[in-house]
Amino acid sequence: MSELATYRDYLDHYRSTLLRQAEGLTPEQLAARSVPPSDLSIGGLVRHMARVEHYWFRMVLDEHLDEERLDSDDPTGGFHRIEPTQASVDEALARFQEWRAYADGTLDRLAGADLGELRTDRHGETAPIRDVLVHMVEEYARHCGHADLLREVLDGTTGL
């Protein structure tokens, strides 16, 4: 298996894990900030990860730094933009799927690329493509752990 395929497998696993954590929950549960004093919610994590996909794949890897970040006016990174309504949940899930599909297209375009090639982020810092992909795996792993704890608090479900 290639290095890129390995990153892609991890990303696919964690993306699916995050969506499984959201399955079967009501809009109220998805918006619930379940572990005081934290204001994390599973719906907020889904919304946040759409923002992360947009930033790292569209803006950094595909070099569109001139675009505005999703939820750029939310200092929490999109976490607070989930409301306990079906419309809010549907929008967050659709946005997540949209940017996941975009990121998959970026991964397709990277097939055969030198993963040591540098990209620049919005702070002017450079990193190899592989570091961006490792960061994405790390970001998902951390937030899937958060989602697992949140789900357990909501309904006792574990091991998704």
Image (tube, rainbow, N blue to C red):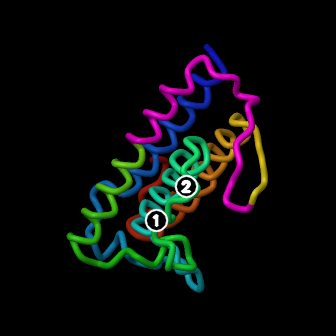
Q: Determine the secondary structure under disc 2.
A: helix
Q: Amino acid at mark 2?
A: Tyr
Horizontal and vertical percent position of residue 28: 30, 76
Q: How many marks?
A: 2
Q: Quadrant of the N terminus?
A: top right
Is residue 144 positioned above or below 113 on the image? below
Quarter location, residue 61: top right
Q: Amino acid at mark 1?
A: Leu
| Label 1 – label 2 distance at C-alpha | 8 Å
Quarter location, residue 85: bottom left
Closer to us: 160 or 142: 142
Residue at the disc numbered 1: 70
N-term-proximal mark, 1 vs 2: 2
Residue at the disc numbered 2: 55
Horizontal and vertical percent position of residue 46: 43, 60
- Tell me where the magenta segment starts and ends, as one range: 101-123
Q: Given contact means CB atoms under 8 Å apart, are the residues at marks 1 and 2 in contact?
A: yes
Residue that sits furthest to the left in the current view? 86
7 displayed left or right of 106? right
Q: Determine the secondary structure under disc 1.
A: loop
Closer to us: 91 or 12: 91
Residue at the (38%, 66%) spot, across then down = 155
